[in-house]
């Protein structure tokens, strides 16, 4: 199918944006006429592991199905390997206002998150007037997501930088909070840590044995 002229005119812009923000900035151009292989141009595809011909992301597909197609700016995203991404999607419309494609920007901020956490820990001071508290509301899945997100934030290291031993430590922290008593927790944690559900079970077995012999 022939690429829309508006999209063709934007292709040269990709290189400029990517070069401005560096190697950790992926810029891709999508053609909505072919959702299954929507990417027609991409720079720094190593950030998400995509290439020309890759399909339209689910996030973009959901927006297109809504009644109001608006740009998505600076939303938190995650790569398949656990990278933490700062993402934006700018929708491109024809002369009739119909979306024909979009420009997506994904910046890997994993290293910046590590620096942020290091600085936060260094600048942390005790507030004797603030009581420790935990408040979980919503559905069971919301509770599970909240526990996992809080645990990862407190650990202070993006998943894609974690070693196997560090992932075991995260699983141990979650186990101590009773996370795996929640239905579906094993599958969810496996997805977040970018491992299989069987690996999570192996981690839990390793933790049990380690506790028995005083390792953990």
Image (tube, grey):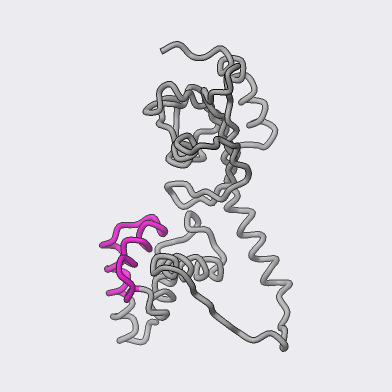
The answer to which image quadrant residue 206 occupies is bottom left
Q: Which residues are magenta?
A: 180-206
Q: Quadrant of the N terminus?
A: top left
- Side of 80 where 107 appears, left or right: right
Is 97 above or below relative to 58?
Answer: above
Q: Is residue 50 left or right of residue 124?
A: left
Residue 193 part of the magenta segment: yes
Observer-nearest of 97 and 56: 97
User: Mainly helix, strand or loop, the magenta region?
Assistant: helix
Residue at the (36%, 87%) spot, across then down: 214
Residue placed at 56% from the left, 34% from the top? Answer: 104
Residue at position x 57%, y 66% in the image: 156
Point out residue 48 in the picture as x, y percentages from the top left corner: 48, 40
In percent of width and height, residue 172 lies at: 40, 75
Tell which of 132 and 68 is nearer to you. 68
In the foreground, 87 or 159: 87
Above or below for 49 versus 95:
below
Is 78 magenta? The answer is no
Q: Tell me where residue 181 appears, x and y as whole percent.
A: 32, 76
Furthest-front residue in this view:
67
Image mark count: 0
Q: Is residue 33 above or below residue 80?
A: above
Q: Quadrant of residue 35?
A: top left
Residue 44 in the image, given as x and y percentages of width and height:
55, 33
Rendered-image quadrant of the C terminus: bottom left
The residue that appears at 66% across and 59% down in the rendered structure is 115
**Depicted 113 relative to depicted 211: above or below:** above
Q: Is residue 32 left or right of residue 207?
A: right
């Amino acid at each position: 199918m022939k690429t829309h002229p508006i999209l063709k005119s934007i292709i040269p812009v990709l290189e400029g944006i990517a070069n401005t923000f560096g190697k950790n900035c992926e810029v891709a151009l999508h053609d909505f006429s072919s959702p299954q292989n929507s990417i027609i141009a991409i720079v720094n595809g190593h950030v998400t592991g995509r290439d020309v011909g890759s399909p339209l992301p689910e996030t973009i597909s959901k927006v297109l199905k809504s009644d109001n197609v608006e740009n998505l700016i600076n939303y938190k995203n995650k790569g398949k390997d656990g990278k933490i991404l700062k993402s934006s999607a700018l929708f491109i419309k024809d002369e009739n206002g119909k979306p024909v494609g979009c420009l997506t920007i994904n910046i890997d901020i994993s290293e910046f998150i590590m620096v942020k956490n290091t600085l936060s820990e260094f600048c942390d001071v005790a507030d004797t007037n603030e009581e420790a508290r935990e408040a979980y509301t919503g559905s069971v899945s919301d509770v599970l997501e909240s526990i996992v997100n809080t645990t990862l934030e407190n650990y202070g290291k993006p998943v894609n930088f974690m070693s196997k031993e560090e992932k075991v430590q995260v699983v141990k922290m979650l186990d101590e909070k009773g996370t795996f008593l929640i239905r579906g927790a094993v599958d969810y944690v496996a997805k977040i840590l970018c491992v299989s559900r069987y690996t999570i079970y192996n981690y839990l077995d390793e933790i049990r044995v380690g506790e028995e012999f005083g390792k953990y």
